[in-house]
Image (cartoon, helix red, strand yellow):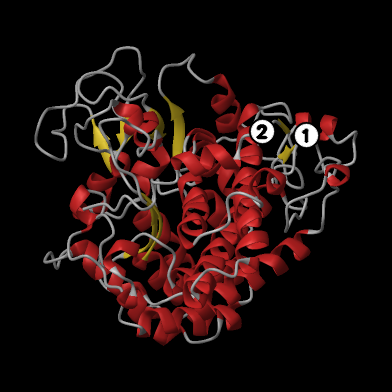
């Protein structure tokens, strides 16, 4: 069963956001509203951290614009839905966007709001005297993990950004951009400190399931190092996660994204959701990608692209588990997907599918998988290969392939290549097949420094030196009086 501890934060979330805002910066310091009358008890400290977790389900964090700026912008998917629906995502899809596109403003505001909640915890909880020290340390570590997650996406999307590590005073609201290297330094420090404190998953209490763990902090830190090309630093972190024996691949790839696959042995970190009768615990992540029409009544965005369909190896069962076609029976066997004449060549992201539930589609109960063990194994294969250990890399790559083929010896044979360049390409291809439509593809192409090559190959007018980063939202530049500045080419 899903735990309710991550959702009891709804009232405290309201308390933390009672002030108006100008862009991503709160106009009235949140500490003035809460420090004297809120951070008094252990329960209140937990609620404050829960409010950060609660924000992970927010529309501007892991829903519409997030999907656009990770999947739709890439070669994995197209906008989908009807032709005229959400034109701002069509602009993202075909690279006709400018700094006024609301997708950029949405994630900018959403992620900085999450950072603000983390900063509030990190400024207040260390000062609390009436709190058990071990709990206090864990809550601080969780806030650092979550702040690092927010900053990691922002810096990959926008490059140099404002670096805010505490609640601001009124005369500090206008912030200049800091070099991406300084942002990464904070991310690395946060994750390193979190990993030193957070418990292993196996040591978590049942009621704490869904909270950040040592393995989650180590895996995310390894991904940061991988993104920066610091393979020697990533390797020991990944080896420790693997050696912890806290995680394992599920035997059947098809079950990962079903309800029974949530918070499974393969889960490193995922956003918990639940469909409550009263609402407030779900997410629209599932709805915006759901079948548009009868059954499922979703919006039909994030259509798997033709290029993704043809990219899978012959017979790879992950293609059928990733893509939901018209005429196909829904994963729970309840109904058949009907043709929607308003959508051209419709198909859907099956990984985002959820069965019928209470509270309507906007109350989607599907957990959002952010890090899973297969990702860790493929990162391990990649860093080992880059560190000159190609033979060792093969075992982790082939574990993922073996799970995908299961008992069929005629598909997905083990990879035996040890040439570094060739093996690198095979690992990258495996990442696409394994992690398709899980919002990893754009970030992978970025760090592999081949986004332009891949985008132009599928007909997208990617301009080198411009589209490597997204534009800073024009509204934020205007509010800063031009202090923020703009990325090159926009």
Which residue sits at x=54%, y=35%?
65
Q: Are marks 1 and 2 in contact (CB under 8 Å)?
A: yes
Horizontal and vertical percent position of residue 447: 61, 60
Q: Secondary structure at mark 2?
A: helix
> Is residue 138 or residue 463 the one in the foreground?
138
- State the image quarter where residue 333 is shown: top left
Q: Is residue 42 above or below residue 96?
A: below
- State the image quarter where residue 141 is shown: bottom right
Q: Secondary structure at mark 1?
A: helix
> Is residue 475 or residue 306 the one in the foreground?
475
Sort mark 1 into few (<14), some (14-19) or many (20+) by Cα contacts within 10 Å. many
Q: Can I make out residue 139 in this image?
A: yes
Label 1, label 2: how far apart the Cα atoms are: 8 Å
Q: Can I make out residue 458 in this image?
A: no
Which label belongs to residue 105?
2
Side of 260 where 233 appears, left or right: right
Horizontal and vertical percent position of residue 411: 20, 62
Q: Is residue 438 above or below residue 141?
A: above
Horizontal and vertical percent position of residue 35: 66, 52
Which label belongs to residue 476?
1
Which label belongs to residue 75?
none
Side of 216 where 397 appears, left or right: left
Sort mark 2 into few (<14), some (14-19) or many (20+) by Cα contacts within 10 Å. many
For marks 1 and 2, the one nearer the N-term is 2
Which residue sits at x=30%, y=73%?
247
Which residue sits at x=25%, y=31%?
277
């Amino acid at each position: 069963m899903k735990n309710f501890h991550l959702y009891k934060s709804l009232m405290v979330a309201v308390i933390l956001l009672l002030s108006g805002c100008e862009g991503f910066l709160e106009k009235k310091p949140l500490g003035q509203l809460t420090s004297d009358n809120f951070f008094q008890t252990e329960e209140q400290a937990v609620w404050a951290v829960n409010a950060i977790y609660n924000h992970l389900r927010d529309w501007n964090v892991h829903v519409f614009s997030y999907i656009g700026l990770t999947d739709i912008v890439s070669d994995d998917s197209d906008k989908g839905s009807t032709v005229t629906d959400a034109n701002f995502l069509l602009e993202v899809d075909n690279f006709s966007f400018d700094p006024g596109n609301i997708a950029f403003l949405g994630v900018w505001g959403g992620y900085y709001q999450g950072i603000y909640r983390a900063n509030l915890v990190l400024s207040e909880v260390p000062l609390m005297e009436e709190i058990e020290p071990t709990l206090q340390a864990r809550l601080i570590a969780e806030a650092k993990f979550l702040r690092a997650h927010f900053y990691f996406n922002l810096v990959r999307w926008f490059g140099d950004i404002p670096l805010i590590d505490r609640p601001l005073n009124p005369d500090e609201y206008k912030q200049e951009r800091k070099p991406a290297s300084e942002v990464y330094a904070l991310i690395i420090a946060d994750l390193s400190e979190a990993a030193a404190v957070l418990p292993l998953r196996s040591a978590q209490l049942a009621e704490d399931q869904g909270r950040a763990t040592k393995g989650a902090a180590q895996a995310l830190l390894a991904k940061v190092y991988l993104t920066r090309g610091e393979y020697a630093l990533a390797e020991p972190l990944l080896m420790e996660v693997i050696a912890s024996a806290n995680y394992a691949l599920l035997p059947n790839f098809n079950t990962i994204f079903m309800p029974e696959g949530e918070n499974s042995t393969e889960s490193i970190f995922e956003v918990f959701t639940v469909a409550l009768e009263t609402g407030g615990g779900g997410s629209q992540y599932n709805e915006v990608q759901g079948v548009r029409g009868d059954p499922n009544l979703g919006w039909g965005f994030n259509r798997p692209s033709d290029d993704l369909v043809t990219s899978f190896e012959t017979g790879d069962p992950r293609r059928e588990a990733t893509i939901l076609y018209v005429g196909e029976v829904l994963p729970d066997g309840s109904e058949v997907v009907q043709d929607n004449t308003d959508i051209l060549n419709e198909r859907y992201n099956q990984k985002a599918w959820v069965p019928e539930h209470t509270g309507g589609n906007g109350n989607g109960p599907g957990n959002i998988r952010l890090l899973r063990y297969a990702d860790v194994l493929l990162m391990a294969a990649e860093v080992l290969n880059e560190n000159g250990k190609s033979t060792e890399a093969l075992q982790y790559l082939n574990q993922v392939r073996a799970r995908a083929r299961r008992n069929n010896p005629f598909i997905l044979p083990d990879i035996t290549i040890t040439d570094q360049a060739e093996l690198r390409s095979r690992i990258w291809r495996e990442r696409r097949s394994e992690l398709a439509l899980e919002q990893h593809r754009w970030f992978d192409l970025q760090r592999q420094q081949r986004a332009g090559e891949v985008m132009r190959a599928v007909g997208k007018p990617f301009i080198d030196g411009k589209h490597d980063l997204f534009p800073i939202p024009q509204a934020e530049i205007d509010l800063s009086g031009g202090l923020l500045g703009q990325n090159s080419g926009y």
